[in-house]
């Protein structure tokens, strides 16, 4: 299949033929041999929760009108199957069993925290998007699962649960659902708890050279910045917005190639400050990056974002006269050429004043001494940052409203550095790919949001052949997606996770603006 033959009109919904093929009357089968379901591999609640999420997104009114004749009924039937699977796999205590054999026998396993968080999110999306008659089942699943959130003990599981709680609160505010009495307080409490847990994970692992929640970027990375950006819609904490955007910028840099297309972090050995794996690129990573970019663009349109920045839609207040110290710690200015020292900067961890102090030995010609001092100072800085954030979190919980976290000017600088760097990446990527529309984004949050949407749409382009090997990763006629991109070409198996990743990226990018 050529890249040209994989092109499709921007307005057309994808085919769901392969998703239907992979689904039987029990649920979604996990793996495929080519495009044929591998029944011996059985089912997972993980995949059925993902599938419930994707059909819920396509059945939402804004997208349902794009569906081909017959797809509305087909997706509604699939939603019934996926809901029934989750009803079957949820235990009396609210936890979901993940792995099920083809003969419907639950397989021995330990609790999967990621699966629990992902299932809660899938049910939340089903409750807010599915037609009447199906929402009730999603609500019942959530009602039993919500008390388990406090015991979820993985960073991604927390991120899914955080996003689910924020989504439910926002959906009620928009009139999509009506929360039962007491639910709003429970959900908001969980948003605050899980937001703080993710922020603390970021503080523990990040420094001036590494802006991430873990020692390495591994799988499903985009869900971490995405969940914090979802939380910002509820808490309006500037620190949350700062970390969400800064970590998204770090992830984008890790996945952007010098040629303008994306290069998902490979499953062979992940991405760390020391090295990055190139091959066994997973479609899941493109979907999660698109998810985070789409949410970042939406967040920039919020009035609370302007309030956090002390701005009125323009970033003109941010001083263009930036020292070399601030460029090194805060990342490239928008006009920094690719490959320049400024363009290789990794972002912000401290205020401008702290940056000047930290780099004073370098200016004095003592770069080696500064490098030797960094490892010893890192634990002290992290401990101080954790204590400061903990004190601010406690103060915020005791006050009404949601006061900003951290020094306002520091937050503004870091937020806008991340936003402007991402905007610049959109223009640089189009120049590298020799596309039109390469003008820098206009000053102001609307211009930056449009740039982020362009980056989101480039994630979809990866599936259509804008990748390292210039090969399409999908069959548009069937909606099938190959499991991964390897050194010698695509892995031709089209399993559940890859296919859902493609269909979800299509759902995100069908919103053209």
Image: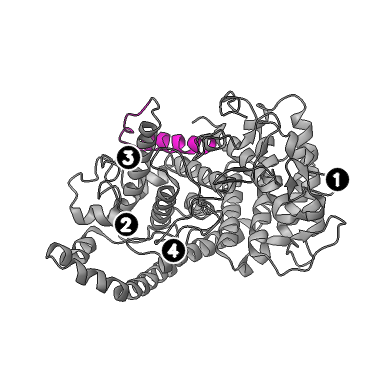
x and y percent of residue 8 in the render? Answer: 59, 25
Mark 4 touching mark 1, by CB under 8 A? no
Q: Examine the structure image and report whether residue 203 is included in the region drawn in magenta.
A: no
Q: Which residues are magenta?
A: 437-460
Alpha-carbon span between mark 4 and mark 3: 29 Å
The residue under label 4 is 202
Q: Quadrant of the N terminus?
A: top right
The residue under label 1 is 25
Q: Image quarter for residue 356?
A: bottom left
Q: Secondary structure at mark 4?
A: helix
Mark 3 touching mark 2, by CB under 8 A? no
Q: Nearer the viewer, mark 4 or mark 1?
A: 1
Alpha-carbon span between mark 3 and mark 2: 23 Å
Dot placed on the residue nearer the N-terminal end, 4 or 2: 4
Left or right of 354, for residue 287: right
Dot placed on the residue nearer the N-terminal end, 1 or 2: 1
Tell me which secondary structure the magenta stretch mostly adopts. Answer: helix
* Few, some or many residues within 10 Å of mark 3 (<14, 14–19, 20+): some
Q: Secondary structure at mark 3?
A: loop
Q: Secondary structure at mark 1?
A: loop
* Numbered tag placed on residue 348 in the rendering: 2
Dot placed on the residue nearer the N-terminal end, 3 or 1: 1
Q: Secondary structure at mark 2?
A: loop
x and y percent of residue 271 in the render? Answer: 46, 57
Mark 4 touching mark 2, by CB under 8 A? no
The residue under label 3 is 312
């Amino acid at each position: 299949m050529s890249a040209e033959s994989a092109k499709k009109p921007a307005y057309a919904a994808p085919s769901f033929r392969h998703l239907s093929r992979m689904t039987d009357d029990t649920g979604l089968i996990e793996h495929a041999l080519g495009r044929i379901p591998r029944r011996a591999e059985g089912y997972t609640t993980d995949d059925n929760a993902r599938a419930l999420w994707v059909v819920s997104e396509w059945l939402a009114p804004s997208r349902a009108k794009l569906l081909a004749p017959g797809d509305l009924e087909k997706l509604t039937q699939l939603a019934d199957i996926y809901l029934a699977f989750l009803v079957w796999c949820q235990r009396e205590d609210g936890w979901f069993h993940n792995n099920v054999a083809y003969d419907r026998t639950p397989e021995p396993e330990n609790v999967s925290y990621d699966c629990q968080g992902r299932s809660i999110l899938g049910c939340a999306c089903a409750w807010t998007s599915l037609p009447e008659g199906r929402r009730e089942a999603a609500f019942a699943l959530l009602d039993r699962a919500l008390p388990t959130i406090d015991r979820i003990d993985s960073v991604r599981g927390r991120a899914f649960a955080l996003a689910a709680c924020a989504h439910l609160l926002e959906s009620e505010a928009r009139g999509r659902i009506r929360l039962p009495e007491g639910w709003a307080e429970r959900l908001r409490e969980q948003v605050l708890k899980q937001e703080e847990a993710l922020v603390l994970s970021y503080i523990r692992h990040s420094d001036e050279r590494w802006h991430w929640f873990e020692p390495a970027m591994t799988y499903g990375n985009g869900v971490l910045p995405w969940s914090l950006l979802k939380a910002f819609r509820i808490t309006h904490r500037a620190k949350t917005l700062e970390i969400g955007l800064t970590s998204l910028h770090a992830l984008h840099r890790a996945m952007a190639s010098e040629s303008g297309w994306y290069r998902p972090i490979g499953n062979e050995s992940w991405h760390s400050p020391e090295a990055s794996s190139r091959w066994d690129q997973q479609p899941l990573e493109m979907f999660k990056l698109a998810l985070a970019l789409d949410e970042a663009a939406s967040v920039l349109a919020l009035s609370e974002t302007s309030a956090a920045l002390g701005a009125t839609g323009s970033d003109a207040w941010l001083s263009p006269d930036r020292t070399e110290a601030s460029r090194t710690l805060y990342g490239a200015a928008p006009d920094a050429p690719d490959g320049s020292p400024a363009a290789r900067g990794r972002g912000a961890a401290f205020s401008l004043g702290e940056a000047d102090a930290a780099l004073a030995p370098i200016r004095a010609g003592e770069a080696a001494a500064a490098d030797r001092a960094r490892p010893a100072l890192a634990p002290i800085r992290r401990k101080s940052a954790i204590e400061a954030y903990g004190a601010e979190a406690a103060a915020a919980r005791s006050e009404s409203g949601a006061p900003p976290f951290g020094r306002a000017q520091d937050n503004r600088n870091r937020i806008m550095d991340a936003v402007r760097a991402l905007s610049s990446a959109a223009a640089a990527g189009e120049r590298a790919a020799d596309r039109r529309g390469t003008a820098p984004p206009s000053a102001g949050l609307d211009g930056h949001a449009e740039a982020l949407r362009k980056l989101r749409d480039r994630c979809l382009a990866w599936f259509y052949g804008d990748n390292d090997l210039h090969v399409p990763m999908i069959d548009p006629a069937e909606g099938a997606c190959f499991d991964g991109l390897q050194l010698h070409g695509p892995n031709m198996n089209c399993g559940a996770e890859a296919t859902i990743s493609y269909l979800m990226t299509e759902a995100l990018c069908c919103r053209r603006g």
